[in-house]
């Protein structure tokens, strides 16, 4: 009897996890919890200790179904110059965070190619941010 109890618990936990995954797979786009983090600050401490920490954990801990980090303005220049932040962004991308950058800002700072080399999608962000706002994404700015 004692040997059966752990087996039953394993079966129960497995079925719960499988059911949970199927629920997420069948979730409609309108039901997804989506977060867009707009990072504009040129302060490396804000990036590392606030913006990146929350953004990465939002994805890793499943607080949101989709997480996007938007590099906009002075943050583009900072990112192009700071190896520690570059490594953190690469890790976020590996963890499933989508990272986008404003092409106009990146071009103003002359860093579009550097950002693209990090795996960041550099594009016109005005229309994209407008979609995020209109489609009821949660938008957080740093």
Image: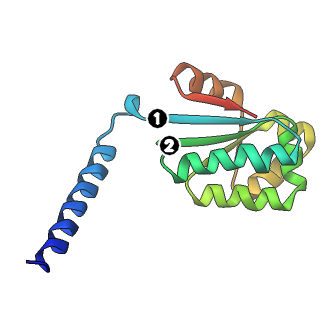
Q: Residue at x 66, y 31 (%)?
A: 140
Q: Position of residue 137 (x, y in %)?
A: 54, 28
Give the quarter of the image for residue 76. Answer: top right
Which disc, if any, is residue 33?
Answer: 1
Using a 10 Å C-alpha cutoff, classify the residue at mark 2 as few (fewer than 14 neighbours), some (14 to 19) or many (20 or more).
some
For residue 13, what is the image quadrant?
bottom left
Percent across and percent down for residue 66 are: 51, 42
Between marks 2 and 1, how big is the CA–CA gap? 8 Å
- Label 1 crowding class (10 Å Cα cut-off): few <14, some 14-19, many 20+? some
Residue 111 in view in this figure: no
Q: Count all numbered tags in the image, as a single digit.
A: 2
Q: Residue furthest top?
A: 134
- Residue 71: image x %, image y %? 75, 40
Mark 2 residue element:
loop
Quadrant placement of the N terminus = bottom left
Q: Is residue 83 left or right of residue 62?
A: right
What residue did someone put label 2 on? Answer: 63
Q: Are marks 2 and 1 in contact (CB under 8 Å)?
A: yes
Relative vertical location of residue 135 with respect to residue 110 in this rendering, above or below: above
């Amino acid at each position: 009897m004692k040997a059966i109890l752990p087996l039953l618990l394993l079966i129960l936990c497995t079925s719960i996890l499988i059911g949970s995954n199927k629920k997420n797979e069948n979730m409609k786009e309108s039901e997804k919890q989506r977060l867009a983090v707009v990072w504009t600050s040129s302060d490396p401490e804000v990036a590392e200790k606030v913006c990146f920490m929350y953004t990465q954990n939002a994805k890793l801990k499943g607080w949101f179904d989709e997480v996007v980090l938007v590099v906009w303005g002075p943050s583009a220049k900072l990112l192009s110059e700071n190896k520690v932040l570059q490594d953190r962004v690469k890790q976020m991308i590996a963890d499933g965070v989508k990272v986008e950058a404003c092409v106009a800002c990146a071009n103003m700072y002359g860093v579009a190619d550097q950002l693209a080399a990090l795996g960041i999608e550099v594009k016109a962000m005005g229309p994209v941010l407008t979609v995020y706002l209109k489609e009821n994404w949660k938008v957080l700015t740093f």
